[in-house]
């Protein structure tokens, strides 16, 4: 299979959503999120998600027209009932409202519940940082992570993203609080590879190096007890602000037919000044510092993914053939030549 | 040395600050912070810090009377010039203002610069959660942590604390983004113990298990590249909101004579409701879940430290004799019988 121009991937993905009843403008938003994740190298949050989203629309658990019911609980606190809308549609609608409000309030927060999967949080962080604002994004997920010292999953993979304006590109970090993603465990299982000790427990709650057993069990928090504290902290923080489901009650982030009841938090903040030179200089000092391995320069989070994204925009991208065929079929489109 | 009643420790610590020119009410605040850290088992943030704070007051880099110059940059964004005030005095003054404001705005943020060391963030998180509010606290420090793949320190130990109301006690997590504290490296060095591989680099940027060499080098981020991304994310987030110093420009958190130029962020938020039963029930489910080691029940962050704190309040506490003698001398007090 050869490289497909990103414009072609984009138009096909948009068509697939439009065929499922999504408006062209919302299809563009949802497709852009998936494509950016795909091109940044996060296939688990990329085109792979498209057929599931279409299935969720068909099953009636994703409403392609909903933008969320917004109400200001306080002058800087936007409470959003997500109405089963598409994650990026509901979230960007809330973020637009926060960006308008924050010039007056300095900080503005949105607590969203009952919208679909947000996808890769880096997408939101980059967008807001490019507007000259600062973002913290948090979202919960189905319980996949075991508490430190516990035997089964009770906590979501609960990622955090931070976006800060800088030159030549914004600082964007985005990471789950799990040791690995469930997608990675499935990938190891599919390839018959064993996983390192410490990544996961099996269904009975025992440590395992068997990837297939791990997919039925639970993932370790990253970084031991600290990662556990962080992931749990995000779970209760999001839960208490959104009144969303907690722990094993969370549904609809991994299936095709359950209403998604997790919660999302966005905090938009005004920087102290419009001059980001000192932030940029600090990041450059790190980029240029002596590396432990001279062949691997010290990286700023998001730099490599961002460079890969830009490269793909120029050269095109090779999606997984099976997923691409499925998307073309959903778009009623001829499969682009392999 | 026998146990000293906590009231005696408190009155002596307060006297030591009062002798240095701190008002009784500010002495009570600063002493309470140090004592809670001490009793929660965080000696590195406990009474050990008292003589340094007194030295900083005497050196003119800590102003015992300053509460910080507060200005509302937006209706929910409190900008604070810390005026070299004592950390908990300036911070609690800001937090009181945020708690007043947040009932109207739903979220309120304070960006503080140029105040002294905040100390243990859990202290703030517990206080705010006990008022029924939610808190995120972030603070930077002198660069002690090396970027992932880098050879020297460029990032603070940059802790995060989260406080969420719950019963029977609030959820309070507080963790640095470094693998270990510098205090722990010094402790290993003093006892001639070697440190595990992966904790730190030596001055030349090479991995070391020699604790003394590590104290001259840099500490690893916890959890590898993810902990690095998190600590760096907090550094630039705090920096861009407070216009405080970044990386190796940060001073005054570890010495006796430099003005402290790090930054602090507090975000106070209103919970979705006053009913914290579902948060409390979720935390209880984790406390009671099957443990990997039946002899070690699964812990909620802060539980053990909180229990130890409560135990000490009843039984008394045994401070480090050397530090206790110093504090008694600073208080012009007779050393309590050992």
Image (spheres, coloured by chain):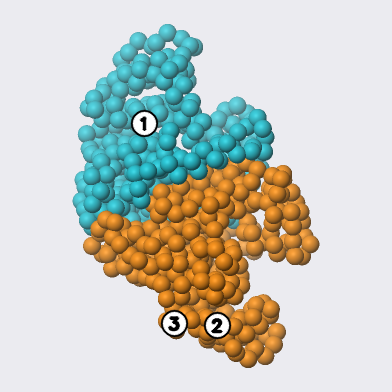
Chain colours: A orange, B cyan
- Chain ID, mark 1: B
Q: Position of residue A33 (x, y in %)?
A: 50, 73
Question: Would you say the residues marked 1 and 2 are in contact, meaning their CB atoms lie under 8 Å apart?
Answer: no
Q: Residue at x 50, y 62 (%)?
A: A260
Q: Residue at x 46, y 40 (%)?
A: B280
Q: Position of residue A225 (x, y in %)?
A: 57, 42
Label 1, on which residue?
B33
Residue A25, image quadrant: bottom left
Q: Nearer the viewer, residue B179 or A28?
A: A28
Compared to A247, does A29 lie above or below? below
Q: Nearer the viewer, residue A276 or A129?
A: A129
User: Is any part of residue A52 visible from this angle?
Assistant: yes
Are labels 3 and 2 on one chain? yes
Which callout, 3 or 2, points at the residue further toward the start of the chain?
2
Label 3, on which residue?
A23
- Chain ID, mark 2: A
* CA distance separating discs 1 and 2: 58 Å
Q: Nearer the viewer, residue A153 or B142?
A: A153
Q: Secondary structure at mark 2?
A: helix
Tag 3: Cα neighbours inside 10 Å, few (<14), some, or many (≥20)? Answer: some
Q: Residue at x 48, y 27 (%)?
A: B307
Horizontal side, residue B167 vs residue A5: left or right: left
Q: Secondary structure at mark 3?
A: loop
């Amino acid at each position: 299979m050869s490289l497909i121009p990103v414009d072609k991937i984009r138009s096909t993905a948009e068509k697939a959503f439009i065929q499922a009843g999504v408006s062209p403008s919302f299809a563009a938003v949802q497709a852009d999120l998936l494509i950016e994740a795909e091109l940044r190298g996060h296939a688990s949050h990329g085109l792979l998600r498209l057929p599931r989203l279409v299935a969720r629309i068909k099953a009636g658990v994703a409403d392609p027209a909903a933008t969320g019911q917004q109400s200001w609980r306080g002058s800087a606190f936007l409470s959003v009932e997500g109405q089963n809308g598409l994650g990026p549609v509901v979230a960007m609608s809330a973020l637009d409202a926060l960006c308008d409000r924050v010039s007056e309030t300095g900080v503005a927060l949105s607590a969203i519940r009952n919208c679909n999967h947000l996808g890769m949080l880096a997408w939101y962080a980059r967008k807001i940082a490019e507007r000259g604002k600062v973002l913290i994004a948090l979202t919960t997920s189905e319980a996949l992570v075991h508490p430190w010292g516990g035997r089964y999953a009770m906590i979501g993979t609960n990622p955090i993203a931070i976006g800060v304006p800088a030159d030549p590109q914004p600082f964007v970090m985005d990471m789950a609080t799990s040791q690995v993603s469930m997608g990675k465990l499935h990938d190891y299982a599919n390839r018959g590879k064993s996983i390192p000790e410490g990544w996961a427990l099996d269904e009975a709650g025992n440590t395992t190096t068997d990837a297939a057993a791990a997919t039925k069990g639970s993932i370790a928090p990253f970084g031991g007890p600290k990662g556990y504290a962080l992931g749990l902290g995000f779970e209760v923080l999001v839960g208490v602000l959104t009144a969303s489901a907690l722990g094993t009650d969370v549904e609809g982030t991994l299936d095709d037919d359950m209403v998604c009841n997790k919660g999302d938090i966005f905090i938009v903040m005004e920087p102290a000044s419009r001059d980001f030179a000192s932030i940029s200089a600090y990041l450059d000092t790190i980029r240029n510092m002596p590396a432990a391995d001279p062949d691997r320069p010290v990286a700023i989070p998001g730099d490599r993914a961002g460079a890969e994204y830009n490269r793909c925009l120029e050269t095109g991208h090779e999606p997984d053939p099976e997923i691409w065929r499925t998307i073309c079929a959903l778009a009623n489109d001829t499969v682009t030549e392999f």
